[in-house]
Image: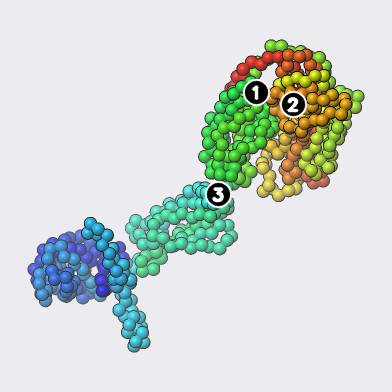
Amino acid sequence: MVVDIADPLRGGTRRNGRVSSATTTEITIDSATDLSVDTSENPKLSVVLANGLVETRNIGSINGAVVTVPVAFSQAPAANAPWLIQTDDIESQQFRVISVAENGDGVFGVSALKYNESIYNAVEQDLNLTQRDITNISAAPGSVSNLSLVEFLYEEGGTVRTGVDINWSSSVNNPALEFVVRYRLDDNNYEKLIIESPSVQIKGLKAGNLEVQVTPRTNIGRIGPVTTQVFELAGKTAIPDNVQNLTLEPLNYNSARLRWDETVDLDVKVSGKVHIRHSNLTDGSATWSNSTDLIAAIAGSATEATVPLLEGEYLVKFEDDGLRKSATETTIIVDQPVSQTFFGVKTQREDQLSTPFDGSKTDTTYDSTYDALILDSDGLTAGTGEYAFDSTLDLEAVYSLDLERRLVARGIYPTDLWDSRTDNIDTWQDIDGGVVDQVNAELYVRKTNDDPSSSPTYSAWQPLANGVLKARAFQFKAVLTHLIRRKTSLWTSWAIRRNSSNALSKAPQRLLAAHQPKLSRLPMRFLQALAVLEEQTARCPPSASHR
């Protein structure tokens, strides 16, 4: 079965509707609104009769909503019967019905293919294929306006990717039926989309310049002006937002819980991290550059972490899967009152020994120019070095000690000149050298119940922040690290405190270390200072404040 359809959007004028009332020669249609028929173009009226047949008659005249035919229909069309008008300049579209399905409530679904009856003569008689003239729209559509783009991140297969929503406004006076969208990222090949709505979503992109071209097109293939605009996509290069609503809750005398709002950045939440640093400064002057890692970075989706409870300032940043961190650290200060009792027995400073820094060194060496312990060439290559404190703390009996780390750090660029930075500028984490976080220092402790002057068996080295350890003797060492591909420096200091009812030595120890330049690489210098072992017999609950 072949059906005729008059589409006002494609035809440019209304040519169909329902019969309001009729005789065999006068048909009153439902409305004359938007009805435009040129009687010189051989107009014809087709109507569905009561018996289900379609009859077509030439039109004699049209007066408002009344259409008169000179040759009467075989019977008067019933009210609400469909009608359709065709002329030589605007014909109906024809479709061949493939199937009809009833969906319930009087709704039918019709599947049909575009039909052209001239195809048979074209094949059998070698004639030209003719196309029906279904529209009087000859003008090209107007150009689109208000071309805009919204960038977003989405998760796919456990990976965060970049997508965009592109929107525009179609011309009001001469709207288009569809739009041809061409786009390319940087100098890649163009991709092409054909859509009917004035918006499109594109996924699988990355940082770069996205060129978008939108061309309006009519149903008969007439095209309008091309609107082109280039958008700069941040992709996953945008830095994460800062941590919000950071709070600290003491759990006991040596541990606490940090809490914060979940990140809104998908590339942090899916495969990023949360970094927590600490400085023993309590005056609000701590920065990311003068602090060190307190615990290992945790998953970016986390909203809390249990940390050692230390006096000083806690600093927290988000990091996305491209190693980009929040612009500004969020901090909270813990100010613990001075202990009620303090016993000092012995004082010892590493820098005031007859031979400064006379402890055991691994990939480190003392440099009198800096009056510092620096990484030697092997340490620079490996990115790490160690210094073992010169003396062992011997309690002469087994006691339980509450040890607390106090570590101060300051990262610097000692030779921060553009000409000195020879690596690819795309790998620089900052241009101004304001934030230095590619260096770190950690304090480690090991213990034994044996006499340290004989042949003791020590435990494995473990990081020291704070906590209660039970042993007779303790040894301490510092581990200095830097990320070799970055060019930074660090100044740090630390202190170790213990709680005990037995009088023990107070042994201030000082450690100064710095990286030296290596060929074209900017030196990464550690200035490690002031390791103090103190005794205190009481602690007061800490107080916390934000800045």
Spot occupied by residue 260 in the image (x, y as percentages of width and height): 55, 32
Location of residue 92 by image quarter = bottom left
> What residue does disc 2 label?
494
Amino acid, disc 1: Asn
Q: Is residue 223 left or right of residue 64?
A: right
Q: Is residue 94 left or right of residue 486?
A: left
Establish if 496 lies above or below 525.
above
Amino acid, disc 3: Gly
> Which of labels 1 and 2 is toward the front?
1
Location of residue 130 by image quarter = bottom left
Q: Residue at x 25, y 71 (%)?
A: 3
Per the image, label 2 sits on a secondary structure element best described as strand
Amino acid, disc 2: Trp
Distance from label 3 to label 1 (Cα)? 37 Å
| Quadrant for the C terminus in the image | top right
Establish if 397 lies above or below 217.
above
Q: Is residue 289 left or right of residue 112?
A: right
Q: Please, which colouring scheme is shown?
A: rainbow
The tag earlier along the polypeptide, 3 or 2, is 3
> Which of labels 3 and 1 is toward the front?
1
> What residue does disc 1 label?
254
- Nearest the viewer among 510 and 472 is 472
Spot occupied by residue 510 in the image (x, y as percentages of width and height): 81, 25
Spot occupied by residue 145 in the image (x, y as percentages of width and height): 42, 54
The tag earlier along the polypeptide, 1 or 2, is 1
Let me know if residue 81 appears in the view: yes
Per the image, label 1 sits on a secondary structure element best described as loop
Q: Residues within 10 Å of mark 2 (few under 14, many from 20)?
A: many
> What residue does disc 3 label?
158
